[in-house]
Amino acid sequence: MDVAGGPEPELAEAKDLAVLDRVRAAPPLPVRSSFTRSLLDAGTSEQKLAEVWLEEGNAYYDPRSDGVTMTDWFRTMLETLDR
């Protein structure tokens, strides 16, 4: 820890670089949006959508814990990205 109580600068920079590497390695947004739309259009089950979001997407937030279906969550994300 540094004097201010934050992480050492080298550690923070390493984490920042790791995030950038993940973003860089991800498919372009139109590809991801198209993939998500295809899942919704195919009537993919809530369980499979949850698997895609939580396991394959490595997400931490599960919208079902707030009473939101995975279908509604994906549709809301797509609508927001389309703005």
Image: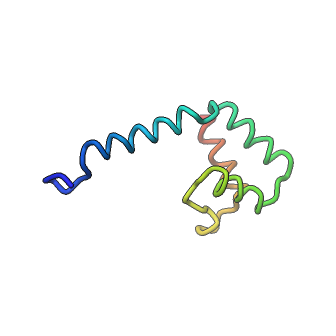
Residue at screen point 25% across, 43% down: 9
Q: How is the image coloured?
A: rainbow
* Farthest left residue in view: 3
Q: Between residues 34 and 27, which one lies in front from this camera angle?
A: 27
Horizontally, residue 75 falls left or right of residue 45, namely left
Determine the image quadrant of residue 45: bottom right
Residue 50 spot, x, y in % from top left:
70, 59
Determine the image quadrant of residue 63: bottom right
Determine the image quadrant of residue 68: bottom right
Residue 7 spot, x, y in % from top left:
26, 52
Which quarter of the image is occupied by the N terminus? bottom left
Q: Between residues 27 and 82, which one lies in front from this camera angle?
A: 27
Which quarter of the image is occupied by the C terminus? top right
* Farthest right residue in view: 42
Q: Is residue 21 above or below residue 41?
A: above
Residue at screen point 85% across, 52% down: 43
